[in-house]
Image (tube, grey):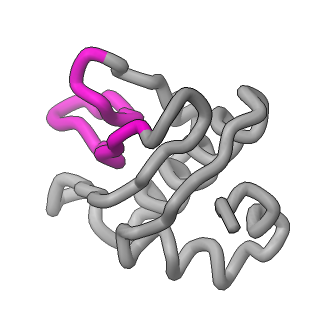
Amino acid sequence: MENLIVENNESKHRFEINLEDGIAFIQYTKQGEDVYNLYHTEVPPQFGGKGVGSALAKGTLEYIKAEGSQIIPTCPFVAAYLKKHPEYQELVRK
């Protein structure tokens, strides 16, 4: 799937991709001013296996990187994505 835009919905504390019939999101809490605890990922079932989750993870990490913030990857999906994409390990809070 192409042209998937990730947006930070600060009021709901989640990064989202609006799909034609659903929303994929990564839920977070803020730990201080510049650390996101990414704790839950959800993709509508009809979009499973189509790259939406990976696009969501990448877009979320790119957003956080551009902001100069860090992450705590407590969500298993995000943790698995980081193992496959070590270029984002620099974002993980030590």
In x, y percent, where is residue 80?
Answer: 51, 81
Res. 88 image quadrant? bottom right
Residue shown at 30%/30% (left/top)? 13
**Observer-nearest of 94 and 2:** 94
Residue shown at 51%/35% (left/top)? 4
Examine the residues drawn in magenta and state their main secondary structure.
strand
**Observer-nearest of 11 and 24:** 11
In x, y percent, where is residue 26?
Answer: 35, 48
Residue shown at 29%/45% (left/top)? 27
Query: Left of 18 or right of it: where is 77?
Result: right
Query: Left of 5 or right of it: where is 75?
Result: left
Segment colored magenta: 11-30
View extreme (top): residue:
11
21 vs 80: above or below: above
View extreme (front): residue:
32
Residue shown at 63%/73% (left/top)? 82
Query: Left of 94 or right of it: where is 46?
Result: left
In x, y percent, where is residue 3?
Answer: 58, 32
Res. 76 image quadrant? bottom left
Query: Left of 93 or right of it: where is 27?
Result: left
Q: Quadrant of the C terminus?
A: bottom right
Whether the magenta-drawn stretch holds residue 57 is answered as no
